[in-house]
Amino acid sequence: MNEKTLSPATAETQEPGASQTVKAQLRLREMILAGELPGGARIAELAIVERLGVSRTPIRAALMRLEQEGLLEALVNGGYAVRTFSERDVSEAIELRGTLEGLSARLAAERGVAAALLAHARDCLGQIDAVLSQPALDDEAFLRYVTLNQRFHNLLSDMAGSTVITRELERVVSLPFASPSGFVVSQANSPQARDMLIVAQDQHRQVLDAIERREGARAEAIMREHSRIAQRNLLEAMQSQDLERMPGVRLIRKRG
């Protein structure tokens, strides 16, 4: 049932449980990415209930959502365990995202995009420019960039007007580390971080220009190249010894 069709009484009774599920989901994700729940570890539901102070129903819902995100795997005899990923898994997921986003950008250019949607994209890029205009980026600025970056990529997906591609993109970016900002926050303390974001922002502007000019092949090539930044970030993350600023990298197994 759509939220707009819910009666006030129904909405009130559903909201607390939904809120508890979201809170549990966010906290569990933090624990996994911070290494508090190590890769391969079986999730003890009762222990989580006691630790988070939340009832079993929202905990179970949160665990199901995290399985859908790809951070957990369902065990044959019941329950869940924290997933681990090979470096190749992550690299291929990033490559797949670049391929899908490239296809989406090409179709947007070939089919044309509504002026209002293009205006939203330009406004979003203007806000990213404002963030990157700072000489140094603090954690708040990086988080702001992540939000705006995701919004721009969502707008690019909308421009293709394809429910099939949008659905597949949603699936691939839900994989850990495959999203457009999968490694951005982990760059926060890197001297080259702002420079890399400026390069990414230039590619954002170039792909929007290609779409407006109806240059499909160019738009596709730019988005495939855009994903190479994430591949570079993956390589640097795997080579880094500073795991404290690399949330979740512990879940990635290095190439043999």
Image (cartoon, rainbow, N blue to C red):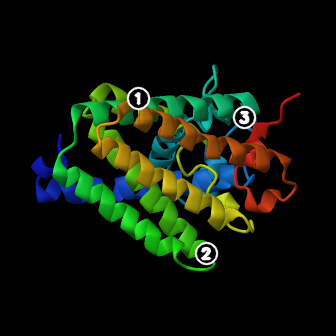
Give the mark, 1 or 3, whose residue is nearer the N terminus: 3
Q: Mark 1 — residue?
A: 103
Tell me if residue 91 comes above or below residue 186 in the rendering.
above
Q: Which amino acid does label 3 sit on?
A: Thr
What SS does tag 1 mark?
Answer: helix
Question: For the residues carrying marks 3 and 2, which lies nearer the camera in this image?
Answer: 2
Question: For the residues carrying marks 1 and 3, which lies nearer the camera in this image?
Answer: 1
Q: Where is residue 57 in the image (x, y as percent from the top left)?
A: 45, 45
What SS does tag 3 mark?
Answer: loop
Tell me if residue 251 comes above or below residue 244 in the rendering.
above
The answer to which of 183 and 231 lies nearer the viewer is 231
Q: What residue type is labelled 2?
A: Leu
The residue under the point 53% across, 47% down is 180
- In the displayed structure image, the side of residue 249 where residue 55 appears, left or right: left
Give the mark, 3 or 2, whose residue is nearer the N terminus: 3
- In the displayed structure image, the side of residue 115 where residue 51 appears, left or right: right
Q: Quadrant of residue 81?
A: top right
Q: Quadrant of residue 252?
A: top right
- In the displayed structure image, the side of residue 92 where residue 10 appears, left or right: left
Q: How crowded is mark 2: few (under 14 residues within 10 Å), some or many (20 or more)?
A: some
Q: Mark 3 — residue?
A: 84
Q: Position of residue 115 (x, y in %)?
A: 17, 51
Q: How crowded is mark 1: few (under 14 residues within 10 Å), some or many (20 or more)?
A: many
The answer to whether the residues at label 2 and label 1 have Cβ atoms under 8 Å apart is no
Q: What residue type is labelled 1?
A: Leu
Q: Residues within 10 Å of mark 3 (few under 14, many from 20)?
A: many
